[in-house]
Image: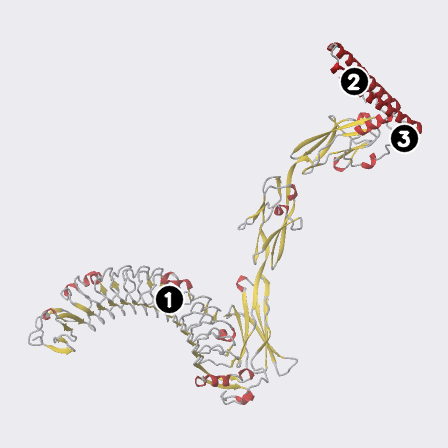
Amino acid sequence: GVCGNKPPLGFKALLTHSLRKSLMWLEQPAAYQCRYVGQHMVLHSCRCTNKLKNTLCIELVIIDDVLFFSSSRHHNKIRRLEGSLLQNFTALETLDLSNNDITELREHCFPAGLQIKDLHLSSNKIVHLEFGAFKNLAGSLQILRLSRNRLTQLPVKGLELPKLTQLELSRNKLRLVEGLTFQGLSSLEVLKLQRNNISKLTDGAFWGLARMRVLHLDYNSLREVNSGSLYGLESLLQLYLSNNSISNFNPEGWGFCERLRELNLSYNNLTKLSEGGFSKLVNLNSLRLGHNSISHITEGAFRGLSSLRTLELDHNDISGTIEDTNGAFTGLENLNKLTLFGNKIKSVAKKAFSGLEALEHLNLGENAIRSIQPEAFSKMKNLRYLHIQSDSFLCDCQLHWFPEWLVTRGLKAGVQATCAHPESLKGTSIYQAPSQSFVCDDLPKPQITVHPVTTAAVLGKDVHLTCTAASSSSSPMTFTWLKDQETLRQAEVENFAHVRASDGGVMEYTTILHLRHVTFNHEGRYQCIISNHFGSSYSNRARVTVNVLPSFVKTPRDITIRTGTKARLECAAEGHPTPQVAWQKDGGTDFPAARERRMRVMPDDDVFFIMDVKPEDMGVYSCTAKNTAGMISANVTLTVLETPHLAQEMEDRNVVVGETVALQCKALGSPPPRITWLKGEEPLRPSDRHYFTPGNQLLVIGSTTLEDAGRYTCVMSNTLGTERAHCQLNVYQRFEECAPFSSPSTVTVGIIVIAVVTSIVVTSLVWVCIIYQTRKKSEECSVNTGACFHTVCICSAFILMYFLHKSFIYNLCPCLLQMRQLSLLMSPVTCPLRALYQRDRTCAYGWSPMVDLNPTDA
């Protein structure tokens, strides 16, 4: 019944377009056909007019009585869309308007109520996309194709399509992708922006695309990949950046897409792979870097890529990495495939592939390899395919191991190797050459004999680096100088050759690199490469440093400061390399302040402090600045001011007339105090008996007289003040001489005197006891009368004893009293002139008693 003469229900809503001028309703199509696709019936209607060359064909697909429309209007000349003509197609899911002449898309082009899921607008002439042009399709649109148009910019936040999963914008004229341009496309998984003219991705350009898995940015004009441009792509799995002009990238940017599995950076302008450049991409499986200009791979460049399986480095210039560098592939322990096709590799170093134990496929094709060092492939136990194609092999003793190893490992099929030297084996396959012919009889490959030397230059001076190699081949030599693994293109180089004196068959080739008026830009590691047809030799790397003699930017100054305060010493210097600044005190490193932990150093400043300054901190401090270019120094004097004071208190002195006495005033202070002496209040002047030691710290009085006795004052003064100290000088007369005690009669008299005195004392004690007992027992005697009597007796006895004793001793031996006086007067004191006071003190020389001395006072 459906495929009868009447169209099915709703068929009158189908449109046929006059694609050039008009759009009309077709109530009764002239013809329609039915066909079956599986169990689904498809009704196809076409209507042509005499005036139209193209036709709109509409297919109605009926599945379980539900209508799905698929409308194709491609390859026509539609210039604009009228929303009113589409408002009745509420069941339409796919609309193809590609290959028309549409120039703009506005908000009214797609009325509300449409359920379009797949919209094709590619290959039009769209130059303007109005903000919110697709907002009425936000609830249904999943695929939007806008490729091959003329869009130059996209409205920021203008694509609010939360269900969109695929967006194609390739082959437009976009130059810049602004931040937040794609916000609102929260379900987008595939974004195609290839073949535009995009030169810059601003920070946050893809913010909001948290579910995006595939991003195509190939065939654009990008010069770099900055870190912020990839922000928000945490679900990205595939990133295509090939065929741009990228010369560098920020390694931190990869941290925003850590789930990335495939990265394509081929056909760009990369020249160097730095250490850790891909360390954030821990899940990366495939990395394509072919067709760049990479000439150096730093050791550790692939660190962190433990999941990488495929690495493509075809058509670069990394010959130096394979020929001279060790550890370039460190970190690729799970790599399966490595392609180095067309890299101008001439030799393979022993450790060129260290770290590739899991490698199964190695492509070294299209490289004119001359030599392979023994054990270059020994660590690759899983190697199944090795591709080498070269007719330039140097079949000498260094290659003897290679043919047998290839056969043993079953890798012969992928290796086509032909000898180029020696002449007898030229053109012979290495498999057919006799093993005994692999000998080292000459030096066709250059051998470095003189390596460049590490040099420390002075800013503005000239530097010359020399490199020499020897070879027995007549093949032309080429000389290349590298700085930090990059070729010096416009260097001033001098090359010459001469025959070696010891061996006329060997030529020596010398290359000299001239660095004129060196600056800091000349600093780096230099290496020479000398090559000929048979291979290249790499010299050791020589470091050139440019030094500048230190100069002070902060010069220390003399300091005068009081004790107990804080001293600030400042010194700073500049130079290249940065000079080391050090301090010395009085030419040494003994700092009292450091020993006593009174020194404070500021780590981020050029100052150090001495806390609680003491006099011993005073001195000359030297600030030295030293680097490899030389050393300079500057001196600063630290003066500590201190008020005058005594180091030792002054003491009173006793002296005998005629002797010499010294009065000491040991004064301290800073500056050193000036000392003057006063007697009483009168200043002392030097005389024949009064003289001073240097500094006036010692006053010496010779031949003392009684007039010298009195109070002496030491006046100490400096710029901080004046202090006084006093001492008393006592002068005594000399006693008369007494007779010696050595005669026997004198000794006898002494014994008698002692006996008499003893008898008197004993008698007195007996009388005291008798009187005490008599007083106690007498009852008849009056107390008052007895007491008076006994008292008188006792007093009389004691008075008698005293006078007898005193007069007798004094009259018999006055020398005893004289000796006693001497011991009392001459108390021990510190005397700086001890020799002046040494004399015999026997009675033979005796001392005369003082004028006012009498027996009673003694």
Which amino acid is tagged 3? Answer: Ala
Quadrant that contains the N terminus: bottom left
Q: Residue 447: horizontal and vertical position, in percent?
A: 58, 78
Q: Earlier in the sequence, mark 3 or mark 1?
A: 1
Mark 3 secondary-structure assignment: loop
Residue picked out by circle 1? 222
Q: Is residue 119 left or right of residue 630?
A: left
**Cβ atoms under marks 3 and 2 closer than 8 Å:** no
For the residue pair 733 and 167, the one nearer the viewer reads as 733
Q: Earlier in the sequence, mark 3 or mark 2?
A: 2
Q: Earlier in the sequence, mark 2 or mark 1?
A: 1
Disc 3 residue crowd, few under 14, some 14–19, many 20+, Cα 10 Å: few
Distance, label 3 to label 2, CA atoms, is 47 Å
Residue picked out by circle 2? 770
Q: In the image, what residue occupies the spot 45% across and 68% down?
A: 303
Which amino acid is tagged 2? Answer: Ile
Comparing labels 2 and 1, the label whose residue is closer to the camera: 2
- Residue 844: which numbered mark, if any? 3
Comparing labels 3 and 2, the label whose residue is closer to the camera: 2
